[in-house]
Image (tube, rainbow, N blue to C red):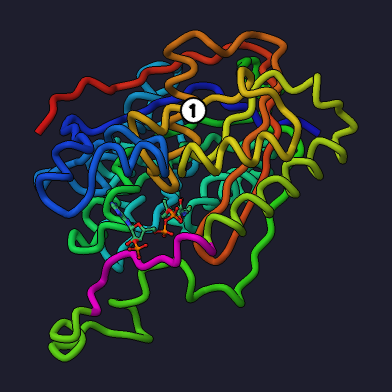
Amino acid sequence: MADAIIWSVGGYAPPHIITNKRLSERMDTSDEWIQTRTGIRERRSAGDEETTATASIQSGKAALEASEFEAEDLDWVVVCTDTPEMWSPATACFVQDALGARQASAIDLTGGCAGFLQTLQIMSPLAQAGKRLLVIGTELLTHALNWNDRSTAVLFGDGSSAFLMGPSDAGHGGIRIGPGLSRSDGSQTDILGKPYGGTRYAITPELVREGRLHTIRMEGPKVFKHAVTMMSDIGRRVIQEAQLGLEQIDWVVPHQANQRIIDAVTHQVGIPAERVFSHVARFANTGSASIGLAMSDMLDQRLIKPGQRLLSVAFGAGFSWASQLFFVDQVPPAQFIHAGEPV
Ligand SMILES: CC(C)(COP(=O)(O)OP(=O)(O)OC[C@H]1O[C@@H](n2cnc3c(N)ncnc32)[C@H](O)[C@@H]1OP(=O)(O)O)[C@@H](O)C(=O)NCCC(=O)NCCS
């Protein structure tokens, strides 16, 4: 059977840069506190003029333009997001229309910060079976933040990334999707999420008066502990099941949540810091966009070379967590749109 291959990669970091200093003018925080606790220096914001669909279109177009394919060649457009365009229809339908992917089926998937790896694991068999897919991860998390809650508002940012995928027997090289695993523990749904605004807690004037907004809520220290334990465990398991040694992993591409979490996970797995990619200082936590955005940046910086093995680990709301191996048969073409200005 064919393997699933990433044929090209697109990344989009929205143009508004919000520095820690800018946040400290808006709330009771400081650059020093944020950098010490998280490693984050700045994050991107899409601003009011953009939506999850427009950001997805940017990264989707970037991946298509970098490739030999046209939108009409696509069988599937998939958007993984926790900040959708609207409840219904799927964000992916807006993207499919705007790109002109007239032969494609479009669907959204939601899985918190582990959602992008889960989506790749769900969609890879379709690529193996010969389908061409545009798999996009997008979050406009600055639209989902409570700007009065300093413990969450400083952590997140906006971004979008896209993988164009297909089968290995179609004559196009790229990054091969290797073994992966994902797990969930739905008994922890109250620790991290955006609980209000759904069917359980519909937004009512009473809820708004009580300050229960449709924004992200999190018990930070609990999330920290679980994130480190679960990502270390699943990362080690995937390496073991693939019968690889740690020295055979050239890069760890972790979910970019927080530098302290990244450091703790890679220390526990036993991979030296110089083989771990992090740009959390510049882009903060972009949820479902994070791992694709990191790969897009790595390709832009020419850090990914033929023959390398990459290990991704992610953790997020649910809780859900996942790990995925990638084998670089050929460096895929990529386009990373990241010019920005402080606001
Ligand atoms: C959020 C996080 C950075 C907080 O760091 P911490 O060392 O655990 O800090 P605490 O939560 O113990 O808070 C310590 C103090 O800092 C304060 N504080 C919280 N946010 C602050 C901010 N932005 N600026 C200044 N002070 C802040 C708290 O109010 C608390 O004050 P108190 O002691 O007077 O009550 C940390 O728990 C974390 O990284 N969690 C995981 C978050 C994450 O990555 N989530 C997404 C996963 S996908």
Tell me which amino acid carries mark 1: Ser
Q: Report whether 290 appears left or right of 178.
A: left
- Percent of width and height locating residue 157: 30, 43
Q: Report whether 38 appears left or right of 95.
A: right
Res. 263 image quadrant:
top right
Q: Is residue 316 visible?
A: yes
Residue labelled with disc 1: 278
Q: Could you say which is closer to the camera, residue 99 or residue 279?
A: 279
Q: Is residue 84 visible?
A: no
Quadrant in which ligand 1 is drawn? bottom left
282 is within the stretch colored magenta: no
Beta carbon at label 1 within 8 Å of ligand 1: no
Q: Could you say which is closer to the camera, residue 269 or residue 114?
A: 269
- Which residue is outermost to the right? 243
Q: Secondary structure at mark 1?
A: loop
Res. 28 image quadrant:
bottom left
Q: Report whether 328 appears left or right of 151.
A: right
Q: Is residue 86 above or below residue 114?
A: below
216 is within the stretch colored magenta: yes
- Percent of width and height locating residue 234: 73, 48
Image: magenta residue range: 212-222
Q: In which quadrant of the rendered image does the N terminus lie?
A: top right
Q: Report whether 324 appears left or right of 101.
A: right
Q: Could you say which is closer to the camera, residue 248 or residue 95?
A: 248
Q: Is residue 84 above or below residue 255?
A: below
- Percent of width and height locating residue 22: 14, 39
Residue lying at 86% horizontally and 28% vertically, measured from the top left: 244
